[in-house]
Image (cartoon, grey):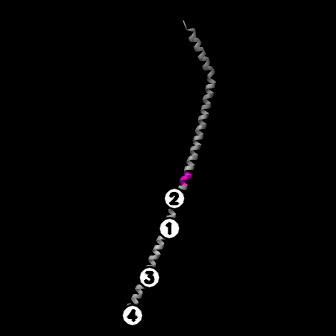
């Protein structure tokens, strides 16, 4: 029985050594996976920030373009209104003068 027990003891020791190696390997794999996951998360966060900044730049540029078009449109409308007033002013002044003369001739 002695040789069998010795054989079993050496098998137990080998099993314990293999289990210890497997545990260390599992810890290393877990640590590496955590480090990689952290790196991926950091990269994802950086990419998201860059994407948000780019989207903000695009929205700002579009808003500025739209504002510039609105200002141009308002200026054109103001120019048309001024031109219309300039064209109609002599007739309006003439009517006003005629009305004042007419009202002045009605005085008793």
Q: Does the magenta stretch include residue 52?
A: yes
Circle 2 SS class: helix
| Quarter of image, res 103 | top right
Q: Residue 29, percent across and down?
A: 48, 72
Residue for badge 4: 3
Q: Is mark 1 on a helix, strand or loop?
A: helix
**Rendered image: mark on residue 17:** 3
Q: Which mark is on residue 35?
A: 1
Is mark 3 in CB contact (under 8 Å) with mark 1? no
Contact check, label 2 and label 1, Cβ < 8 Å: no
Q: Position of residue 98 (x, y in %)?
A: 60, 14
Q: Distance between the residues labelled 3 and 1?
A: 27 Å
The span from disc 3 to disc 4 (Cα, nearest Å) is 21 Å
In the image, which residues are magenta?
51-55
Q: Determine the residue positioned at 56% across, 46% down.
A: 60
Give the crowd class for mark 2: few <14, some 14-19, many >=20 residues within 10 Å: few
Q: Is the residue under label 4 in contact with that under label 1 (CB below 8 Å)?
A: no
Read off the residue under disc 2: 45
In 3D space, how far apart are the residues under numbered discs 4 and 2 (Cα atoms)? 62 Å
Q: Where is residue 50 in the image (x, y as percent from the top left)?
A: 55, 55
Q: How crowded is mark 3: few (under 14 residues within 10 Å), some or many (20 or more)?
A: few
Residue 75 in percent (x, y) is at 61, 34
Of labels 2 and 3, earlier in sequence is 3
**Mark 3 vs 4, N-terminal side:** 4
Q: Is residue 37 above or below residue 108?
A: below
Residue drawn 44% across and 79% down? 20
Q: Which of marks 1 and 4 is in front?
A: 1
Q: What secondary structure is marked by label 4?
A: helix
As drawn, 55 above or below 18: above
First in sequence, mark 3 or 1: give its number: 3
Closer to the N terminus: mark 1 or mark 4? 4
In magenta segment, residue 42 = no
């Amino acid at each position: 029985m002695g040789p069998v027990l010795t054989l079993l003891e050496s098998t137990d020791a080998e099993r314990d050594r293999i289990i210890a190696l497997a545990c260390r390997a599992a810890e290393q794999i877990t640590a590496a996976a955590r480090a990689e996951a952290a790196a991926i998360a950091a990269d994802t966060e950086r990419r998201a920030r860059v994407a948000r900044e780019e989207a903000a730049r695009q929205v700002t540029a579009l808003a500025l373009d739209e504002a510039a078009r609105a200002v141009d449109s308002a200026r054109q409308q103001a120019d048309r209104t001024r031109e219309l007033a300039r064209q109609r002013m002599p007739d309006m002044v003439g009517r006003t003068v005629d009305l004042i003369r007419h009202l002045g001739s009605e005085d008793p």
